[in-house]
Amino acid sequence: MIDAVLTGILLGLALIFSVGPVIFTLIKLRINYGLASAFYFIAGVWLSDLLWVVTANFFGNLLSQLITYKSIVG
């Protein structure tokens, strides 16, 4: 359990510094439209990421419960 948590933390820290299209869009929005639009963009990215995490967690939990019933069903 602790290994999975440590691996997740290390992967998360590595992904913080990854450069992708979001950072370039953020820089463009900040320069062209100001700080408020950049914050709204980051809030949208954060909410969409949160939605994906919650969805993956829900279906992962559902799948693990279905695997426990596999031996009963056949």
Image: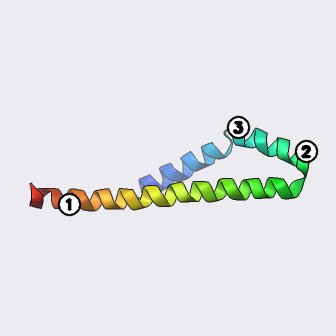
Between residues 46 and 7, which one lies in front from this camera angle? 46
Within-10-Å neighbours for mark 3: few <14, some 14–19, many 20+: few
Q: Amino acid at mark 3?
A: Pro
Q: Position of residue 16 (x, y in %)?
A: 66, 46
Residue at image coords 29%, 58%? 64
To which quarter of the image does residue 43 belong? Answer: bottom right
Q: Is residue 28 left or right of residue 4?
A: right
Residue 19 visible (yes or no): no
Q: Is residue 27 above or below residue 37?
A: above
Residue at image coords 22%, 56%? 67
Within-10-Å neighbours for mark 2: few <14, some 14–19, many 20+: few
To which quarter of the image does residue 70 belong? Answer: bottom left
Q: Is residue 29 above or below residue 44?
A: above
Residue topped by disc 2: 32
Distance, label 2 to label 3, CA atoms, is: 16 Å
Q: Amino acid at mark 1?
A: Thr
Q: Is residue 26 left or right of residue 13?
A: right
- Helix, strand or loop at label 1? It is helix
Q: Amino acid at mark 2?
A: Asn
Q: Do tag 2 and tag 1 residues touch (Cβ < 8 Å)?
A: no
Distance, label 1 to label 3, CA atoms, is: 40 Å
Q: Is residue 31 above or below residue 40?
A: above
Residue at image coords 58%, 49%? 12
Within-10-Å neighbours for mark 1: few <14, some 14–19, many 20+: few
Q: Do tag 1 and tag 3 residues touch (Cβ < 8 Å)?
A: no
Residue topped by disc 1: 68
Between residues 28 and 17, which one lies in front from this camera angle? 28
Residue topped by disc 3: 21
- Quadrant that contains the C terminus: bottom left
Q: Position of residue 19 (x, y in %)?
A: 70, 37
Distance, label 2 to label 1, CA atoms, is: 53 Å
Residue 23: mark in rendering: none
